[in-house]
Amino acid sequence: MRKPELLIPASSLEVLKTAVIFGADAVYIGGEAFGLRAKAKNFTPDEMREGIAFAHEHGVKVHVTANILAHNYDLEGAANYFRELAEIKPDAIIVADPGMVMLAKANCPDIEIHISTQANNTNYMTFRFWYDQGIRRVVCARELSLVEIKQIRENIPEDMEIECFIHGAMCISYSGRCLLSNYFTGRDANHGACTHPCRWKYAVVEESRPGEYLPVYENERGTYIFNSKDLCMIEHIPEMIDAGIDSFKIEGRMKTALYVATVARTYRKVIDAAVQGKEAFEEILPWAKEEISKCTYRQFTTGFYFGKPDENTQIYDSNTYINEYIYLGIINRAEQNVVYIEQRNKFCVGETIEIMKPDGSNVETKVVSIINEETGEKMESAPHPQQKLRVELDQPASVYDLLRKKAPEQE
């Protein structure tokens, strides 16, 4: 049995460290250019070096995305960028465009190249093509079923790796190659600037009545006809392993540390249990299903893995996420019950919050006091994001534990 790698996204140095501590085998990040998440915070070269050093200290790999579909004007800058990555030394570079593959091979000869899902990798002959180019890992298109992936595994060399998405947002366009954003806003999704028009509200126009917009109501807020549910394969990890997949990839390079901690910790424990056997997997599954619903999501689907999606994979009545928990901060220093955080959302003295630990446990605790670390001022609440706080709790906590609280409607 192949024990698959758990590959987690990171939008910032803080999130990378969270992913590493909460169970990732590898983390994928973007630099300041040539990736498909231009609106993510992304990593400066110095942050990349620090993140890679931290990950390697914990035995975790770092992959860097450079998976735009390049135009002529991108190529010179991309070559320079790859030369910079050759000095920074991530474990792999993720690319989609054959021209970018050539540039990466020429300028980063000692770094692995992985072929992105953007390259539409839908059959084993495509995998063999990339193998002949010296590539040893390809990310499957999201449009493949488990049956097709298993067939690919049976028809490619043993030392070639298959990477597949197992959790996160789904795109309406084929393998994420979307033109709607460019059409509506002039921002190119294939250059990382997607405005997510698949989440917008639409009306219908009848051909003989131009300019007359007919609303289609699922509820009073309208209908979101392109809006997919989020992928979640937490209940099907044994089948994913059986298909011969080497790396399980989580989508979400613009997500918070809370999201990353939740998916990393949950999938880590489920994968480990599934490798142990059916009994261990079935024992942990109820906990995992409850935990995975505590990160933001749009309702869940199994995507294409068990056949082509139907109308039940779309969400017509809302474009918003379900959000059961609020992220408060990650502990960067701890002295028993006294912890130090950079605050992310409001909480108050006397409030009951939760300590989320990498080992899978959640500890309820009461906030005893809050002190502004910079001024020494006592505070009854912490309303301003990114304040550095000294927080006393009534339960002990550790460095890298994460603090969260239930969203108001969940209390």
Image (spheres, rainbow, N blue to C red):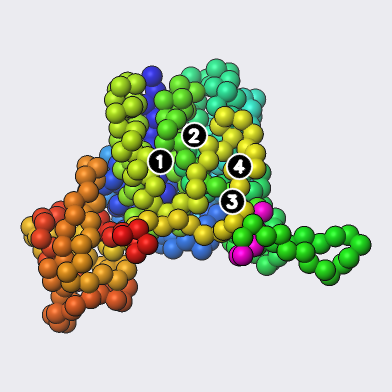
Q: Is residue 309 above or below residue 295?
A: above
Q: Secondary structure under badge 1?
A: strand
Frontmost residue, 16 versus 341: 341
Mark 4 neighbour density, 10 Å: few (under 14) some (14–19) many (20 or more)? few
Mark 3 neighbour density, 10 Å: few (under 14) some (14–19) many (20 or more)? many
Q: Earlier in the sequence, mark 2 or mark 4?
A: 2
Spot occupied by residue 123 in the image (x, y as percentages of width and height):
64, 28
C-beta proximity under 8 Å, tags 1 and 2: yes
Q: Residue furthest left?
A: 336
Residue at 14% across / 79% down in the picture?
378
Frontmost residue, 49 versus 185: 185
Mark 1 neighbour density, 10 Å: few (under 14) some (14–19) many (20 or more)? many
Q: Nearer the viewer, mark 1 or mark 4?
A: 4
Which of the 4 quarters of the picture holds residue 101?
A: top right
Q: Residue furthest right?
A: 208
Report the Cα–Cα distance between label 3 and label 4: 8 Å
Residue highlighted by disc 4: 312
Q: Earlier in the sequence, mark 1 or mark 4?
A: 1
Q: Earlier in the sequence, mark 1 or mark 3?
A: 1
Q: Which residues are magenta?
A: 220-225
Spot occupied by residue 390 in the image (x, y as percentages of width and height):
15, 70
Would you say residue 235 is visible in this rendering?
A: yes
